Amino acid sequence: MKKRTLFFVAVFTFLTTTIFAQTLIAPHFDEGVDLVSAVFRLAGAKEYNKCLIEHYGESFDEYFAEYKNHSAVRYAQIYYNNFGIGYDAVASYGTHLIINDDGFISFNPNIDEKSDNSFNRWTDQQKRDFLIKLNDFYRESNFHQWYESTSETRTAAEQAFQSLYQSIDFHWYGNFFEKRDDAQFGIILSILVGPENYGCNYKLKNGNTIMTPVIGCCRLNSDGNIEFTANTVLPIIIHEYCHAYCNPLNAENWKSMQNLAKKIYKSVEQQMKMMAYGNPVIMMDETFVRASVIRYLINHFPNMSDKMLIQNETQQGFILTGTLVESLAKYEQQRTRYQNIKDYMPQLIKDINHFDIKKYEKQKKDAAKHNATYTVSIKDGESNVPSGEYTIIISFSKPMVEGIALGYGREGTQFLKAKGYEWNEEKTQLSLLVINEPHTLYGFNVMGEKFHTQDGYTAGETRYFNYTTGD
């Protein structure tokens, strides 16, 4: 795509394989994406301050410490705090950039900007103003010098990603949704994005569609090497590509489902907003995508429990997931009748509108009686907590499924610097080892609905905790 020494023709340099008429673009890092991510990291955007490769993040923070008050950073703070420019809008902006051999940054003239909904969260004026400041930052901070000095880490990440990438069944998208002559599949890796991932896609002016999710969820294994774990990363990649198919279909049929969607959103609004899904349209896009991912996983991994997959999504608030998974299974069984997913949409919408929200809310209330309760070893608001290595213990009233689900704390708090976690043998106690800096206000939340009991329920409500460290 757009590295410093490669103009947009670099897209074609990366082309490696063609399936049907769909083209694969080899996974790669993109300096434009990392540049914009870097500025928003300096601006304090939470989602861009989660770098999981510690030495990479430390290298960045040390190198750019003196640029926290740069005008580009101040603009990013204004956009982030006052206009909601964050998450996918940041990564998407980066995918539109070209950096030439002289270090001049411009927008790619081959992209149809209006085709990228994430990019269009910026106003035209904001796009232009930020580009000017971004050019100043790139030149004055010698960003490219730091970028080149850390290339070894990115090369290791690309190599670590290869086996996972090769396991993706790209044929499935054409078979399940529709065969598209215009589709090009790419992946942009970004360590600065941390554990976040964004389903970026846009159209070129020649009519081709570039689906290029930004994947940031690499980590260091016990040997200190970068890895992408299949159990967590593969569903994310499948998920992000599905957005390019599901979102337009929902947009075309929105009027037919909006009344029910708005009622459902009202019922799960708190959960949705915690995940930055701020309206019914986004909720329905996510639900369609997640149901499609489950159909992919069921077809490729027959031993997986569809019940558990559906339950996991439902408990996060995507309560139509089961309805869509069941309807999409009927679609798969009737492909002689339905040529593609677009032909099936009237039936899918019919099934969606048959969902009984009152029945669901009653079942949810009944299920809550079986949820686990939990206690946390640290009290909300506790002060003078020891610095250095410190263990936070979460105790559950029922045996849990192994895993961890912690989120950011209240505004103004630092997120935990986690070193590792461990479950006890009975799976009723989770020990989280953190590194506390002296005289720091930390905050986190325990996502109760994402902790699952072994008998199929959750740990209920999400609760927030703040604490302040001493010496």
Image (cartoon, rainbow, N blue to C red):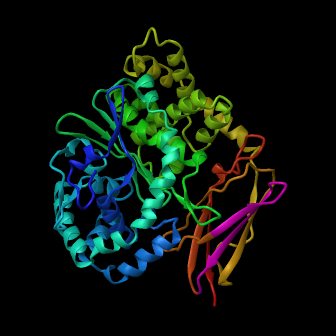
Which residue is rendered at x = 34% and y = 69% of the image? 147
Q: Is residue 155 part of the magenta span, yes or no? A: no
Res. 193 in view = no
**Displayed quadrant of residue 191:** bottom left
Q: Nearer the viewer, residue 403 or 1?
A: 1
Residue 267 coordinates in the image, percent (x, y) = 53, 41
What is the total number of numbered labels drawn onto the structure image?
0
Direction from residue 11 to residue 283 in the image, left or right: right
Q: Is residue 420 part of the magenta span, yes or no? A: yes
Residue 468 coordinates in the image, percent (x, y) = 61, 81
Instruction: Please identify the residue farthest to the top as the structure is shown.
Output: 337
Q: Is residue 248 above or below residue 93?
A: above
Q: Nearer the viewer, residue 223 or 34?
A: 223
Residue 6 coordinates in the image, percent (x, y) = 23, 56
Direction from residue 260 to residue 130 in the image, left or right: left
Direction from residue 254 to residue 224 in the image, left or right: right
Which residue is rendered at x = 39% and y = 69% of the image? 41
- Report the magenta residues as a range: 419-438
Q: Quadrant of the C terminus?
A: bottom right
Q: Is residue 412 above or below residue 233?
A: below
Instruction: Please identify the residue farthest to the right as the structure is shown.
Output: 426
Res. 468 in view = yes
Residue 324 coordinates in the image, percent (x, y) = 52, 27
Main secondary structure found in the magenta portion = strand
